[in-house]
Image (cartoon, rainbow, N blue to C red):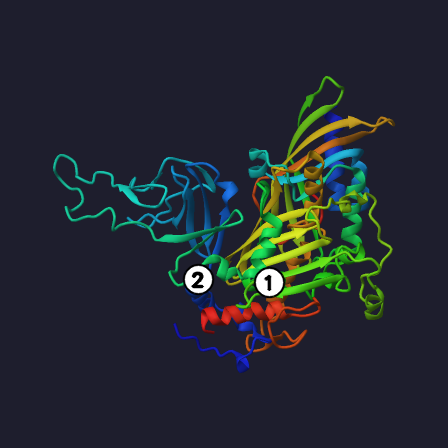
Amino acid sequence: MPLDTVWPEQTIHQVPYWVFQRAEVLAREQEAIFRGACWHYLCLEAEIPTAGDYRTTQLGELPVVVARDAEGVVHAFENRCAHRGALIALEDGGNTRDFTCVYHAWRYDMAGNLKGVAFRNGIGGKGGMPKDFSLAENCPRKLRVAMFCGLVFGTLSEATPPLEDYLGPEVATRIRRVLNGRTPEVLGRFTQALPNNWKLYTENVRDSYHASLLHLFFTTFEVNRLTQKGGLIVSESGGNHVSWSAIEDGAAGAEYAQQQIRSDSDYRLADPSLLHGFQEFGDNCTLQILSVFPTFVLQQIQNCIAVRQVVPRAVDRTDLHWTYLGFAEDTAEQRVMRLKQCNLVGAAGFVSMEDGCVGGFVQRGSAGAADHQAVLRMGGHDAESSDTRATEASVRGFWKAYRAATGL
Amino acid sequence: MQLEIHAFQAAYARCLDDEKLEAWPDFFLADAVYRVTTADNFRRGLQAGLIWANSRAMLADRISALREANIYERHGYRHILGLPLVAALASGEARAETPFLVARIMRDGATDLFATGRYLDVFAHDEAGALKLRERVVVCDSSRIDTLLAIPL
């Protein structure tokens, strides 16, 4: 579809606001990104542990079923009956032997293969499907599935490179750091409805510059300051990133005082047990935010582990699905600490509630400025890893991958 | 205790709707549990909350964070509470289930139905004889929260 829009100066350090505003851009994204050569997070293996378990999810607008068959193999297929297009599975998840469309009772196995057509041979020798009707040729589209550290990803495209190549070695290592060798358990699932284009959230996640400026809670309690030891990893594709910070004694606060940022207050917690986490990873890393292009996030904030999935619902509406995680190996005390630290994140999170509204501020603020551009020049013009987080390199990385995928 | 609980719920709602947020923790015992979750999580027995507190001090921290730290667009609530279904417990405490409906009024006047759900409460008297919450689990009917949850429910 031709778009009458031109990206200014072919850069990744200027982003035109029309990209967050136009229906034809979202249509291009659905095709080129969500149904294109990208890996999309579908669910956790731990959510479908036994034969017959399934979850439903979305690749953008495309509804998907993820299911485990009797042999333990995980499949994913479009949640669309091959007959007339109705949803095949209506629940968020469950356990089943097969899937039957409610409309005309066409039946599918756990891999999305059509296994039965009601009244296929007609009734009393009349009606029915023609003799040349093939079950095998009529099934919803199947996704390629790949798993990594208990995360299930899917893609509709044959052109998507192998998952580990797509992640890149450094991002893969950082996923292993959080998830490998343990058994995740879902502690809760919440959906935050964001009043903005989906890319304003995926930018926000990759924006290490804003973290300690918008989120005062972090800064005040020295959970996270740009002056802490930390860094930024951007994958070669640009699309995946890791932002991390670690506690280091004597981290300077002088830069903050000089900037007169509203981050130095006398505010102290009445119940500081919230911040008394446990050493979980054998390093001093208190925060690791990791994203995989386009819409997957794995978060470690102290002992609060969560995956986030971004699903666009309209040009200016986005669903952010949070899945909070513990591990089967947790002690009772560790589990309580995780529940306590869930207060840091999500729609009511001390640290992250601002991310729910700030995208809306941009959406509304830039409403009359389609042909103007956001400025992404902090830390230069490229999308390289760095040992500072006072940079917008990973946001530029997102646009690098985005432009490559969409051709915009 | 029925009438006492009715009066308590009315005062609780008015406290939040009048934005007297500093007074809100006083509705709870010092070691109270307060949790905001959804019907789906509650049904599945999943423990995490949008808000999860096991002390009154944590509730006080939530209010000071809202006042001092968190950024959000100015808004207020209007709670409409249904009739509490009260069951006395042998301990002299009481369980109550109270349905609620909360409208959110934004700075620009936009008024939306923000949440519906029920309070699952355990009430007890403190040493001074005042009725307090030992536990309040706020079970929202929907799994979806619009934008953010700043002011407690």
Name the chain under label 1.
A
Q: Is residue B67 visible to the viewer in this orientation of the structure?
A: yes
Few, some or many residues within 10 Å of mark 2 (<14, 14–19, 20+): few
Count of numbered marks: 2
Q: Is residue A136 left or right of residue A271?
A: left
Residue at coordinates 65% horizontally, 70% vertically from top-left? Answer: A392
**Residue type, label 1:** His
Along the line of sight, which residue is nearer the eye, A144 or B41? A144
Along the line of sight, which residue is nearer the eye, A382 or A114? A382
Picture quarter with the N terminus of chain A: bottom left
Is A94 located above or below residue A312 in the figure?
A: above
Question: Same chain, marks 2 and 1?
Answer: yes
**Residue type, label 2:** Pro
Mark closer to the chain start, 2 or 1: 2
Residue at coordinates 55% horizontally, 60% vertically from top-left? Answer: A169
The image quarter in which residue A394 lies? bottom right
Residue A191: x percent and y percent? Answer: 57, 48
Residue occupying the far top of the picture? B90
Q: Is residue A360 visible to the viewer in this orientation of the structure?
A: no
Residue A358: x percent and y percent? Answer: 65, 61
The image quarter in which residue B80 lies? top right
Asked which secondary structure carries label 2, the reply is: loop
Residue A167: x percent and y percent? Answer: 52, 60
Q: Read off the residue under disc 1.
A: A241
Asked which secondary structure carries label 1, the reply is: strand
Residue A356: x percent and y percent? Answer: 63, 56
The disc label shown at residue A147, or none: none
Residues at marks 2 and 1, CA–CA distance in whole angstroms:
18 Å
Q: Read off the residue under disc 2.
A: A161
Is A137 located above or below residue B23 in the figure?
A: below
Of discs 2 and 1, which sits in the foreground? 2
Along the line of sight, which residue is nearer the eye, A104 or A398? A398
